[in-house]
Image: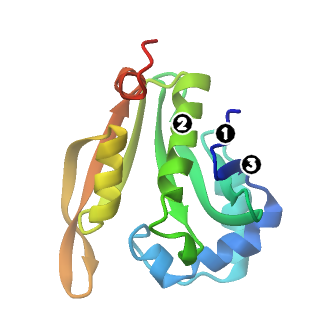
Amino acid sequence: MLFESSRVRLRKMTIEDTALYHKWRNDMDVMYSTNPSLDVYPLEATREFVEQVILGSHTSKSYIMVEKSNETSIGVVALINIDDKNRNAECIIDIGEKEYWREGYGSEGLKLLLDYAFYEMNLHRVSLQVFSFNNRAIRLYKKIGFHEEGNSRESLFREGKWHDIIHMGLLQNEYFKKQGNSH
């Protein structure tokens, strides 16, 4: 099944997910390695963001990752800035529930999203941005097949130091080759 792996199921994000997303979005541990601004948001701002940016946009598709054995919502994966003409999109992944960190759920959720992007949507390219200090994520993305395409030097300030934001990309044919599927 398209949106399911052994442990994870993806379901479309809805307005009912606002409170949960708000909890993750305001958790500094969760946002430390994914959100450049580290702002704390009021619930109203999160609701507006979910309505307009996540649900109201024709250029994004967002899914809640559900751990199947206990039906717990553990994170979010999304394709944003979807460009139909050039068959490109950017992907985002956040595991909001910290007890699910370092357990391989991110990898499973991302692979489900990429399967959808490349097999169903027939995208040519998926890109992402990752903070240079997030070595675990960088290793995961490279293992899946992403290539470093450049970086925005010292564009992120964390704990008194400057860090780069690394830009990575994956092409459809590279993904198929990595999956052992010659399309």
Q: Viewed as shown, does residue 57 lie left or right of 25?
A: right
Amino acid identity at mark 3: Lys
Residue at the far bottom in the pictured view: 160
Q: Secondary structure at mark 3?
A: strand
Secondary structure beneath dot 1 equals loop
> Mark number for residue 138?
none
Judged left or right of residue 103, residue 159 is: left
**In the rendering, at what x and y percent does residue 171 appear?**
36, 28
Report the residue at 63% width, 46% height from top: 6
Which of the 4 quarters of the picture holds residue 38? bottom left
Q: CA distance from mark 1 to mark 3?
A: 14 Å
Q: Which residue is mark 2?
A: 82
| Residue at which label 1 appears | 58
Taking depth in this image into account, of 181 and 80 the one nearest to the observer is 181
Looking at the picture, how far across and down is residue 157, in whole percent?
26, 78
The reply to whether callout 2 and callout 1 are in contact (CB within 8 Å) is yes
User: What's the mark number on residue 12?
Assistant: 3
Distance Cα–Cα, label 2 vs label 1: 8 Å
Instruction: Name which residue lies at 54% across and 45% down.
Output: 80
